[in-house]
Amino acid sequence: MEATTEKVIAAYIKIRDSIEIIKQRHKEELQSLDEQLDVLEQELLARCEATGGNISVPNVGRVTRRVTKQYWTSDWPAMYQMIKERDAFHLLQQRFVGKAMDAFLEENPNLVPPGLNVDSKLAVTVTRARAS
């Protein structure tokens, strides 16, 4: 017996809702663990600072300090100009903004950007019916 479209949509919504409930539950559970890890990380960093280096405890583990950096700008036009002037395009991540590329290609239908690839797939969006 074939399932009706109504049953397929209802099943889709039910499973999607169940996934969101599980994600939320795990998010709440993980938040507590993440907070505990942050406290322990600060304690380990303080101990590394106190000893002046990394820490190694035989049969337990090793703590190695590292510096992580993230960069951003509050002035993108000036940053783009500086990158262009110094031919420093390697500073940027090599990916496209999908919607912007869609619009660009629509505005330039005869342009074929060299090496441009697209992975396109058809998907569905399922919305819950409003209660009447």
Image (cartoon, rainbow, N blue to C red):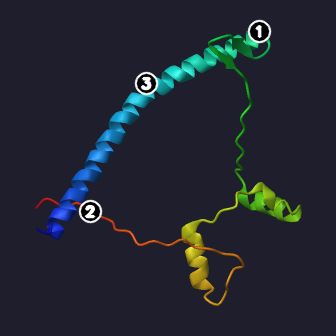
Residue at 31% x, 46% y: name it. Answer: 19
The three-letter amino acid code for the residue at tag 2 is Thr
Q: Residue at x 75, y 14 (%)?
A: 49
In this figure, which residue is indicated by the disc labeled 2?
127
One can see residue 129 in this view = no
Position in image of residue 51 (x %, y %) = 77, 9
Of pointers 3 and 1, the one earlier in the residue sequence: 3
- Percent coordinates x, y for residue 80 in the rendering: 77, 62
Q: Residue furthest right?
A: 86
CB under 8 Å between discs 3 and 1: no
Question: What secondary structure is marked by label 3?
Answer: helix
Q: Which residue is mark 1?
A: 51
Q: Secondary structure at mark 2?
A: loop
- Residue 78, quarter of picture: bottom right
In the rendered view, would you say 101 is above or below 41? below
Are the two marked residues, 3 and 2, in contact with CB atoms closer than 8 angstroms?
A: no
Mark with earlier residue (3, 2) = 3
Check the image and report above or below for 21 versus 63. Answer: below
Alpha carbons under labels 3 and 2: distance apart: 32 Å
Mark 1 Cα-neighbour bin, 10 Å: few <14, some 14–19, many ≥20: few
On the rendered structure, is 60 left or right of 79? left
**Disc 3 designates what residue?**
32
